Amino acid sequence: MEKYNTREFDLIEHVPGSSDIFRRKIWNILEGSSDWNAIITTIDKDRGTYSVVLQGTLKQQPLLDS
């Protein structure tokens, strides 16, 4: 039996933005995905702000026997 590893999603909103920890969490999510893409939802050229949505499919992880 297999499951999806969603641990990184549980933590990502609780780590400081613009930190190395946040960057690693995003990388871990991408590494644990079989495919992904980014959608730019907004961009403000005057202020330099943007919003990006990541969409993807997590790789299945084997369940460990207890």
Image (cartoon, rainbow, N blue to C red):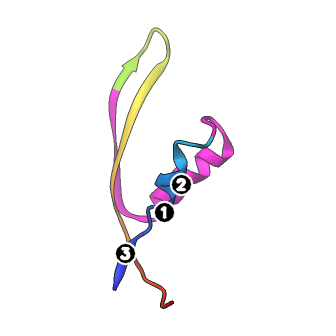
CA gap between label 1 and label 2 equals 6 Å
Crowdedness of circle 3 by 10 Å Cα count: few (<14), some, many (20+)?
few
Q: Position of residue 56 (x, y in %)?
A: 33, 55
Spot the residue most to the front. 66
Q: Is residue 54 left or right of residue 11?
A: left
Identify the residue at image location x=46%, y=57%.
30
Q: Residue 54, located in which quarter of the rendered image? A: top left
Between 14 and 48, the residue placed more toward the observer is 14
Using the rendered image of the protein, determine whether residue 60 is visible from the camera's viewpoint: no
Identify the residue at image location x=34%, y=23%.
42
**What amino acid does circle 2 point to?**
Trp
Label 3 secondary element: strand
Between 29 and 7, the residue placed more toward the observer is 7
**What amino acid does circle 1 point to?**
Glu
Using the rendered image of the protein, determine whether residue 24 is visible from the camera's viewpoint: yes
Verify whether residue 64 appears in magenta. Answer: no
Q: Is residue 34 left or right of residue 8?
A: left
Residue 56, placed above or below residue 3: above
Answer whether labels 1 and 2 touch (C-beta < 8 Å).
yes
The dot on residue 31 is: 1
Q: Which residues are magenta?
A: 16-41
Q: Which residue is mark 2?
A: 27
Q: Which residue is mark 3?
A: 3
- How many callouts does the rendering have? 3
Q: Position of residue 49 (x, y in %)?
A: 47, 20
